[in-house]
């Protein structure tokens, strides 16, 4: 017996036409309508996503970044920094009158200076962070107009020597600090740092330390920036563009030098052009002849050092540099400068799209081999220093014993000999500590850096 016939009414305008279909044909017709409906919705969603992606690629976000070593040693002049409080006040006014998105400052050694700056800038730069480290503090801080999501601090394993009190690097505990910023839908990893100073270029005792710091910085940026949309590194690196440590940072972390990209003709090429990088018109940021705080020996020449940098790379979004210039030189209307350094300002454009490749980076292998040689030299020097400190401890201890014999034979010298013995005992204690502990820590830190470099060579 044939299956029953089911009527299905189709509405066509104002007329109702009854069409008699087989039941199976009716179910197929209804299913087709549902499928077509969902396919239409999916197509609309795909078109929306495509248009939205194009819209995001067309729309770009602009970022304005500034870095400055503010030179704010809190001790009175001449030990500390001259005109410190006045310069900080003028700096705060300048940062308000000419706003930036992100600011990285170095050598803000006194926490009270940082807190005062934060108070003055609070209505414009609501988000800020100070990276605490060492005995005196790292001196490194960040001010931002955008929310800080998280922070991370890495203290360098080598920071100079404890007995070099006149330098102060060991007491500061140099760091690289990272803040993760939320700018719209972007996540920006912003790093600021201050590496060990170069006090004597011809006989650089701290070169192994600064080389190890450069390697640690490059590895820290490399491993913490993988999920970021934008990566920006600023700070006083205390290295010139041709120095090994700086080239190591660019190579290992795959970073661009903002100044070099904007001033290619003056910052790359032959050794002659590299030497011009130190000139006042070539991006020099320190030891400038037009700076009232520069040493007198720099007043009569036109060369200065380019040791402050803004570096960057694309993460999940494309970053391009529009402009990089010197800023914060002379205080308007006055004869003094904001600092013994000048600042750098860079303007970036961020948008979705194909990422740039770090074409300026050199191959890793030659740089790593050279860096390993410098670190190995530091290890040899540490072994020699250990022997010298321990021998000095033994020799001074003998002097202490001699002073005890003199005390018996010459009682009238007892007070003077007691003071001498106390002083010598303190020196012996330090020599023993430095020989057995301080230099052992240095040797192991150098060894760790060397092994990490060798591991990269073996990959």
Image (spheres, helix red, strand yellow):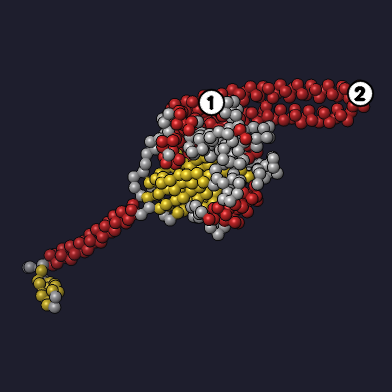
Q: Which SS class for mark 1?
A: helix
- Residue 347 at x, y percent in the picture: 44, 48
Vertical relation: 186 (above or below) 275: below
- Identify the residue position indicated by label 1 in the image: 374
Q: Nearer the viewer, residue 32 or 21?
A: 32
The answer to whether one can see residue 268 in this image is yes
Question: Residue at (36%, 49%) from the top-left corner?
Answer: 352
- Residue 334 at x, y percent in the picture: 60, 49
Q: Quadrant of the N terminus?
A: bottom left
Q: Earlier in the sequence, mark 1 or mark 2?
A: 1
Question: Residue at (51%, 26%) from the top-left corner?
Answer: 372
Assess disc 1: are there few (<14), some (14-19) or many (≥20) residues with their C-alpha within 10 Å of its C-alpha: some
Q: Quadrant of the C terminus?
A: top left
- Identify the residue position indicated by label 2 in the image: 410
> Label 1, label 2: how many angstroms apart (C-alpha)?
52 Å
Question: Residue at (74%, 22%) from the top-left corner?
Answer: 394
Image mark count: 2
- Residue 400 at x, y percent in the picture: 81, 24
Q: Nearer the viewer, residue 92 or 172?
A: 92
Assess disc 2: are there few (<14), some (14-19) or many (≥20) residues with their C-alpha within 10 Å of its C-alpha: few
Task: Left or right? Give the position of 455 relative to 418.
Answer: left
Q: Which SS class for mark 2?
A: loop
- Residue 182 at x, y percent in the picture: 46, 53
Question: Residue at (66%, 24%) from the top-left corner?
Answer: 386
Q: Are marks 1 and 2 in contact (CB under 8 Å)?
A: no
């Amino acid at each position: 017996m044939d299956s029953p016939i089911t009527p299905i009414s189709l509405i066509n305008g104002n007329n109702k036409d009854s069409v008699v279909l087989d039941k199976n044909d009716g179910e197929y017709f209804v299913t087709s309508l549902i499928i077509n409906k969902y396919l239409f919705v999916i197509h609309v969603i795909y078109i929306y996503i495509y248009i939205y992606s194009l819209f995001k690629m067309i729309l770009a976000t602009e970022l304005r970044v500034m870095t400055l070593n503010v030179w704010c040693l809190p001790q009175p002049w001449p030990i500390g920094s001259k005109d410190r409080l006045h310069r900080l006040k003028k700096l705060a006014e300048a940062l308000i009158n000419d706003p930036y998105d992100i600011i990285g400052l170095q050598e803000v050694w006194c926490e009270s200076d940082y807190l005062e700056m934060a108070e003055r800038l609070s209505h414009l730069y609501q988000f800020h962070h100070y990276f605490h480290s060492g005995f005196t503090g790292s001196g490194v801080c960040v001010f931002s107009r955008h929310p800080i999501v998280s922070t991370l601090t890495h203290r360098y394993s080598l920071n100079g020597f404890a007995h070099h009190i006149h330098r102060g690097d060991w007491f500061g505990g140099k760091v690289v600090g990272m803040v993760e910023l939320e700018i719209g839908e972007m996540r920006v990893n912003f790093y600021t740092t201050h590496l060990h100073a170069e006090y004597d270029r011809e006989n650089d005792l701290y070169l192994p330390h600064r080389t190890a710091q450069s390697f640690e910085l490059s590895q820290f940026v490399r491993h913490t920036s993988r999920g970021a949309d934008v990566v920006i590194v600023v700070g006083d690196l205390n290295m010139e563009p041709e120095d090994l440590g700086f080239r190591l940072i660019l190579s290992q972390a795959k970073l661009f030098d903002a100044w070099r990209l904007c001033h290619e003709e003056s910052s790359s090429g032959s050794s002659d052009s590299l030497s011009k990088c130190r000139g006042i018109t070539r991006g020099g940021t320190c030891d400038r002849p037009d700076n009232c705080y520069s040493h007198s020996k720099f007043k009569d020449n036109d060369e200065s050092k380019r040791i402050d940098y803004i570096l960057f790379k694309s993460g999940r979004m494309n970053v391009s540099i529009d402009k990089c210039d010197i800023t914060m030189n002379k205080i308007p209307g006055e004869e003094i400068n904001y600092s013994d350094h000048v600042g750098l300002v860079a303007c970036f454009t961020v948008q979705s799209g194909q990422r740039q490749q770090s074409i300026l980076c050199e191959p890793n292998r030659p740089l790593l081999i050279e860096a390993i040689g410098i670190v190995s030299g530091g290890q040899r020097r540490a072994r020699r220093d250990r022997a010298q400190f321990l021998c000095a401890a033994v020799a001074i201890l003998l002097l202490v014993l001699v002073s005890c014999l003199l005390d018996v034979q010459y009682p009238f010298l007892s007070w003077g000999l007691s003071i001498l013995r106390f002083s010598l005992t303190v020196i012996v204690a330090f020599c023993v500590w430095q020989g057995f502990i301080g230099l052992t820590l240095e040797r192991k830190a150098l060894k760790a850096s060397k092994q990490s470099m060798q591991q990269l060579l073996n990959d």
